[in-house]
Image (cartoon, rainbow, N blue to C red):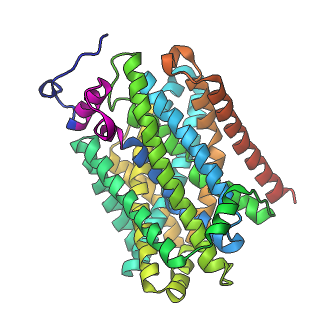
Amino acid sequence: MNDVAVPQSELGKQSRAAWAGQQAVLGKRRGLRALLPFIGPSLIAAIAYVDPGNYATNIQSGSEFGYRMLWVVVLANLMAAVMQTLSAKLGIATGRNLPELCREYLPKWLSVVMWIISEIAAMATDLAEFLGASLGLNLLFHIPLLAATLVTGVVTYVILMLERFGFRPLEIFIGVLLGVIAVSYLLETILSRPSFAAVASHMVVPWLGGKDSVMLMVGIIGATVMPHAIYLHSGLTQRRIVPQNEEQAKRIYHFERLDVIIAMTLAGLVNLAMMYMAAAVFNTSGHTQVADISSAYHTLEPLLGPAAAAIFLVSLLASGVSSSAVGTMAGQVIMQGFVGFSIPIWVRRIVTMIPTIVIVWLGVDPMQTLVLSQVVLSFALPAPIIALVWFTRNQKLMGKLVNRPWVTWLAGAISALILSLNIVYLVVSFGA
């Protein structure tokens, strides 16, 4: 099929952004105007990388171990960028998402097992995100935690309703919330004044400690390389701007790769800022046992002032609300792809709220729940990664977007590293 320009008036239900993207693919837009229509899917996926689970692991790591675990954040973010790029490419090349391909090409029993694991991971994700947003509301506005949980559910449902107006309004709204988080941590960096020499050094110098640091290392990777984000990204690109031939698919992938680089760089910088702020404020002042978000807030206020504490809570609230909405979107993609049916989004919203409500009702420590939820995510991660690598190396499926051999090797090495870390965690936790 040849490259033919389609008048905007003939695009029917397609949005203006989709039309602009097609014009860019046809070479009728250049520079930033060509890139802008493709900015969005990775911003939605990137929210998963700055969710309250990241706050939990990064604050605990920074307060307890100072700057020494920054290298884990860098490693995890690079791994995440590779996987999100492959996921975006899979959706563009095949027009299907990862769960759909698993259901079509894998044995039925394996697809069902992966669905169950993925649903557990999605529940762990939503648990962390709901708790984070609820804690933010509770601390910022002094709303009882249980009531804050219910408010979070209503707010995230309203955000999800934006999708009825096309993909662009939701992308813009999520992008604005990601911007709020980024600006918040820029301000926190100015206020906390970290040692940039220590930051630069520990970003590249690996360090391994004992049992506690290994658990947090697995948690950081689980909080950064997210199973539901890998599934979701392929769903966000599969029908967003549809290529008419393989050459157009290559052009779309070129733009989406830039989208991934921008979004994941932003998410990576935010994660680094979370940890080095905790290191600069808590660890260096002797507060090495700040292991929960509430303690972080109450410790920040006397050390840096009420402005720093308020900024922290605003960023946490933006993170929790946006990531919870994205988690619900991912849950829909996972269920519909693996088992071929979906439920109304309000039903999923209510069902996924239940574990959080139960935990709050029982008075379970929210911070430990957040950290453990990230460890659960790390154990759920190998399955989608292995499937993603397997499909993107398939020439018949991917066409000209098939992985180059070095990309497959790199992605395979990432999978092996995650599996190895999980084994080390088990040995350290239960074998000592």
Q: List the single residue furthest toward the left.
A: 9
Q: Residue at the spot x=65%, y=74% of the render? A: 63
Q: Nearer the viewer, residue 414 or 341?
A: 414
Left-right relation of 407 to 23: right
Left-right relation of 298 to 30: right
| Figure check: 158 above or below 83 | below
Q: Nearer the viewer, residue 366 or 311?
A: 311
The magenta stretch spans residue 102: no
Q: Nearer the viewer, residue 361 or 134?
A: 134
> What main secondary structure does the magenta stretch of the protein show?
helix
Give percent across and percent down for residue 285: 65, 84
- Specify start and end residues of the magenta stretch as a single range: 17-39
Image quadrant in which you'd find residue 114 = top right
Give percent across and percent down for residue 235: 41, 35
Left-right relation of 407 to 41: right
Q: List the single residue furthest toward the top.
A: 1
Q: Residue at the spot x=60%, y=66% of the render? A: 275
Q: List the single residue furthest toward the right.
A: 432
| Figure check: 87 above or below 177 | above
Give percent across and percent down for residue 209: 80, 63
Residue 335 is at least partly visible in this image: no
Residue 240 is at least partly visible in this image: yes
| Figure check: 231 above or below 299 | above
Give percent across and percent down for residue 220: 63, 57
Question: Quadrant where the C terminus lies?
Answer: bottom right
Image quadrant in which you'd find residue 249 = top left
Question: Quadrant where the N terminus lies?
Answer: top left
Q: How many marks?
A: 0
| Figure check: 177 above or below 312 | above
Image quadrant in which you'd find residue 57 = bottom right
